[in-house]
Image: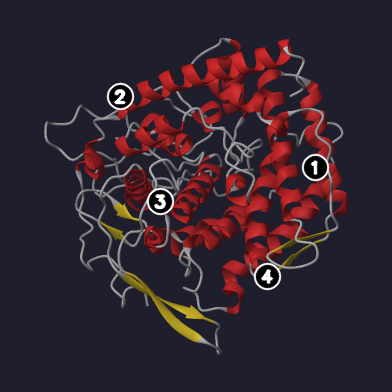
Amino acid sequence: MLKATGIGIGAGATALATPAALATPAALATPADAAGAPLAHPGLLHTRADLDRMAAKVKAGARPYAAGFARLTANRHAQSGWKANPQAVVYRGSGSPENYRILYNDIHAAYQNALRHHVSGEEAYADTAVAILNAWSEKLTRLEGSADRFLAAGLYGYQFANAAELVRDHGDFDLERARELLLNVFHPLSDGFLSHHNNAVVTNYWPNWDLAALACVLATGIFCDERAVVERAVEYFKHGDGMGSVEHAIPVVHEDGLGEWVEAGRDQGHALLGVGLMGTVCEMAWNQGIDLYGYDDSRFLKGAQYVARWSLGGDVPYTANTRKKGAIGGWSGTETASEVAGVDPGMTRPIWAMIANHYTRRRGLPASYLTRAAAKAAPEGGGGDYGPNSGGFDQLGFGTLAFTRDRVEEPTGGPSPTPGPSSGGSRGAGGVRPRASAPPAAGQDLAATGSGDAAGWAAAAGIGAVAGGLLLLRRRDRVRRGVAE
């Protein structure tokens, strides 16, 4: 249906190699030991090397890590006094009462306390995270409501797994009960959605629905050491029927190297959510030796660049598409998105640092729009810093602290490089880490050359330093005035 309605490759655009694509080594094969290797822990959004880097950089007062840590410590969820309020049944979209806000606030408190513990070394924060997670794994039995229950399962499932992964070795953490919660409550809804899409036609739901479910399935597989579940998620990312698989979410690659994000025809907020979720999936897979970032000639890079440019107020092309809607065997109809939606350049979400650092600093690839978006958002906060509603809690955040990397870093947790001729980009589960590209020639398009990378990262460091100083001054003032955090 997608091809028939004109959003496939060749409908108004051509998927041609760009200077950026040509600079990417090809012949990327799966590492020989990847399929049979045990899953790495910690190995969701953060590896042991990542956590050690954060702690060392913050201890040294390095920029912009210190500013990112200041955002974390200033957040009310990151305080060791947080008390969990677990529920037996969580409702989203409908039900009595609709109480899903309690769940996402507690999960973000668990994650932020756990992250704060790893950076500061203070045990009180780990103890708080463990207490929150244990309380929920003991009590929560079901997720109910409207179709939004699938969003709750996907979003809060991957987030619960990430918080739990950070304390899985804590002596008081009930690892087995956390596994059961993920496998019996969160995962069945998410995996079922990828299979049946709530009994709707497969294109009824925009990409972010699939991507939330996909993030949960992948995180569950990794946390619970279920390799078949991990492989299910990876296969869906590459070849799934729904709109969240990478070629359906980014159906057109234009000659300038921008990959059209299909949900840009809907609205900015949901497009940002989708990019953030796809980045989350790619990062968790990377930390298990699976390169989804580079899959299909780094297709996600091209889509993320597109959304970054558009969100910064730049012009982007959009190919009209019509998707089918409705229930299988019931009501059906169509909806056409004919042009890109309007944007508010002031809107931001904590999604850019992770993606920009991967492509420019792990891989040495140009990505000027990503670095500009990351600089604008720096230092990134987390849940509670972007408003009280659910959209402000869709990402775990704190990317400035967690994902800033030295250029060009050779990671210890990602796929091993596989040498080969440069003949067509990143194809496979392995990953090659090319060094930084040569400076672009004058007049080349920034989407292809990324000539603004250095300036973008310099801006991020400067913004981080200023913001970090303001946050620290604010906290000192509150202490002087006797105001509790």
Circle 4 residue: 146
Q: Nearer the viewer, residue 174 or 111?
A: 111
Residue 52 image position (x, y, % from top left): 61, 21
Residue 315 can be seen in this image? yes
- N-terminal of the two: label 3 or label 4? 4
Q: Which mark is residue 455?
A: 2
Give the amino acid type for the residue marked by disc 4 in the picture: Ser
- N-terminal of the two: label 3 or label 2? 3
Mark 1 → mark 4, Cα distance in angstroms: 25 Å
Quadrant of residue 111 within the rendered picture: top right
Left or right relative to 64: residue 361: left
**Label 2 close to label 4 by CB (< 8 Å):** no
Circle 1 residue: 133
Q: Nearer the viewer, mark 3 or mark 4?
A: 4
Residue 66 can be seen in this image? no
> Image height check: is 11 above or below 88?
below
For mark 1, does the 10 Å Cα neighbourhood hold few (<14), some (14 to 19), or many (20 or more) residues? many
Quadrant of residue 376 within the rendered picture: top left
Q: Residue furthest bottom?
A: 329
Q: Quarter of the image containing the C terminus?
A: top right
Residue shown at 37% from the left, 78% from the top: 1
Mark 1 → mark 2, Cα distance in angstroms: 41 Å
For mark 4, does the 10 Å Cα neighbourhood hold few (<14), some (14 to 19), or many (20 or more) residues? few
Residue 455 image position (x, y, % from top left): 30, 24
Helix, strand or loop at mark 3:
loop
Left or right relative to 465: residue 295: left
Circle 3 residue: 428
Q: By what rule are the colours in the image chosen? A: secondary structure
